[in-house]
Amino acid sequence: QLQLVESGGGLVQPGGSLRLSCAASGFTLDYYAIGWFRQAPGKEREEVSCISSSGGSTYFPDSVKGRFTIARDNAKNTVYLEMNSLKPEDTAVYYCAAASTIYKRDYLPLFSDEYDYWGQGTQVTVSS
């Protein structure tokens, strides 16, 4: 009943763009921070972005800073990750996750164990 579903992945050429969507069902995202993680074969899982439940705070690591943006649309119960200037090293399965932040509306969870719900992932492939 409580699910997150990612969509929007696919194959793009270096320098291209993709927009990923994370849609919730069975619960509202209004009081959840949303994180995006990626994992490639042989590499550790990396948090590439998150947005606070208020929408007022965001996080990006240096690996994607300036290229990725995140936004939430509470009316659609969806969070988006826009990826620009994609590089082959961005190739990975991308997961979204939700963390309850009822009392801290600008809190940014930066660790995977802070998240309560996870999607199944969507593949992003950037060709060389």
Image (spheres, grey):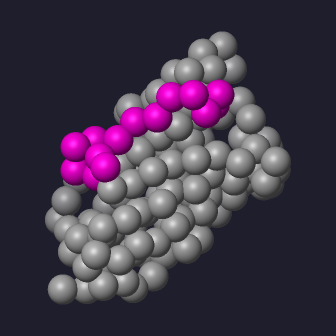
Q: Nearer the viewer, residue 121 or 48?
A: 48
Left or right? Give the position of 60 relative to 73: left
Residue 111 magenta-highlighted: no
What stretch of residues is rendered in magenta? 53-66
Q: Nearer the viewer, residue 56 or 6?
A: 56
In the rendered image, the quadrant that contains the C terminus is: bottom left
Task: Tell me where residue 116 sits by quadrant.
Answer: top right
Task: Tell me where residue 113 sits by quadrant.
Answer: top left
Establish if 48 lies above or below 33: below
Left or right? Give the position of 43 relative to 104: left
Identity of the residue drawn at 65% across and 28% down: 54
Residue 127 in picture, x, y percent from top left: 25, 85
Residue 102 in picture, x, y percent from top left: 69, 20
Establish if 86 lies above or below 38: below
Q: Nearer the viewer, residue 16 or 37?
A: 16
Left or right? Give the position of 32 relative to 76: left
In the rendered image, the quadrant that contains the N terminus is: bottom right
Residue 51 in picture, x, y percent from top left: 53, 37
Q: Main secondary structure of the magenta part?
A: loop
Identity of the residue drawn at 26% across and 79% down: 14
Left or right? Give the position of 23 relative to 35: right
- Look at the image and tell me whether residue 61 can be seen: yes
- Look at the image and tell me whether residue 41 can be seen: no
